[in-house]
Image (cartoon, helix red, strand yellow):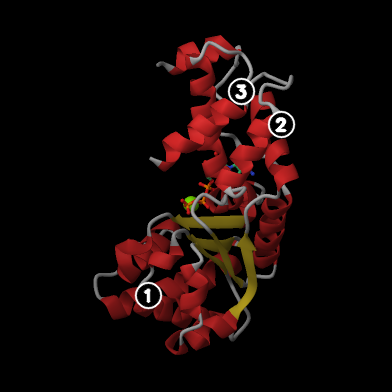
Amino acid sequence: MSIDRLQAHYGFTRMPFSRDIPPQALHPHPTHREAIARIDWCVSQRQLAVITGEVGAGKTVAIRAALSGLEPSRHQVIYIPDPTIGMRGIQSQIVTALGGTPAFYSGVLATQTAGLLAGELDERARLPVIVIDEAHLLANSDLESLRMLTNTDMDTGSHFAMLLVGQPTLRRRLKLAVLAALDQRISTRYTITGMGATDTADYIRHHLKFAGRSDPLFSDDAIGAIHQAARGYPRAVNNLAIAALIATYAAQKSIVDLGAAQSAITENNE
Ligand SMILES: Nc1ncnc2c1ncn2[C@@H]1O[C@H](COP(=O)(O)OP(=O)(O)OP(=O)(O)O)[C@@H](O)[C@H]1O
Ligand SMILES: [Mg+2]
């Protein structure tokens, strides 16, 4: 089964439900827009925000969309996709992004990071925006170090914005006594939930339209079944929709019906 054949069968101009959907073609469902609004606010106020959501809820996509809307000459985005590199790794990335050479000794590196972060706005009129994705993977000691970073800076008037993005365990971890000081510094919190049934239906049609099919390709009950099984989470919707397209193709049918959706759901649960 090749993607080419699938595309030809349905007359898609590009594959729908793909990961590489450009920011301007994203589906603007309410939680997506809300998340972007929170991120924009956090950046404009130079604050610390925490964005959480289940796996595949659309966290990374929302960040990308929000960051792509920032004026590049006035912001220095430092995106850290994998925080398991540890605090040293994070500090090194920040220093490098701000044009420095990371110091060898940890104590020096910490001071260097804080210094460069504080200077970027004053000296180059660019606001550093630190984004840590998968932040639930941060060790408690790393979270504590991040607090120290915000401490030195944010008490005297903040010179950067920071977004912690991760799975719901992040929110729960921040409630731990040892992290209370960091928790207090968080000004914005937002949880990206699954889409409602109407939004999922609209989301599916949106992806199909982007792939060149504006006519109803999925039956309403197929959409309903996919929504329920995916609990409205975009990545799960994508996976089920693609599996349903393949099942429909295999059955040599042209409309994705409830049967195709159900077989996609069954396959997915195996
Ligand atoms: N607003 C949207 N419009 C179109 N597609 C979307 C949207 N939000 C999410 N998606 C789709 O859902 C997929 C999953 O989104 P994303 O990678 O942002 O999830 P995540 O919350 O970061 O997941 P993880 O916890 O696994 O990192 C994306 O690859 C994209 O295809
Ligand atoms: Mg992600």
Q: Earlier in the sequence, mark 1 or mark 2?
A: 1
Q: Earlier in the sequence, mark 3 or mark 1?
A: 1
Q: Earlier in the sequence, mark 3 or mark 2?
A: 2
- The residues bearing labels 3 and 1 have C-alpha atoms spaced at a distance of 48 Å
- What label sits on residue 256 in the rendered view? 3
Name the residue type under label 2. Answer: Asp
Name the residue type under label 1. Answer: Asp
* Left or right: 23, with 37 as reference point: left
Decide: is 153 above or below 59.
below
Marks 2 and 3: in contact by CB < 8 Å? no
- What label sits on residue 220 in the rendered view? 2
* Left or right: 17, with 141 as reference point: right
Residue on which disc 1 sits: 142
Mark 2 Cα-neighbour bin, 10 Å: few <14, some 14–19, many ≥20: some
Tell me the quadrant of the picture where the N terminus can be found.
top left
3 vs 1, front mark: 3
- The residues bearing labels 1 and 2 have C-alpha atoms spaced at a distance of 47 Å
**Ligand 1 positioned in quadrant:** top right
Mark 1 Cα-neighbour bin, 10 Å: few <14, some 14–19, many ≥20: some
Give the structural element (helix, strand or loop) at label 1.
helix
Question: Where on the picture, by quarter, is residue 8?
Answer: top right
Asked if the beta carbon under badge 1 is closer than 8 A to the nearest atom of ligand 2, the reply is no
Question: Where on the picture, by quarter, is residue 40?
Answer: bottom right
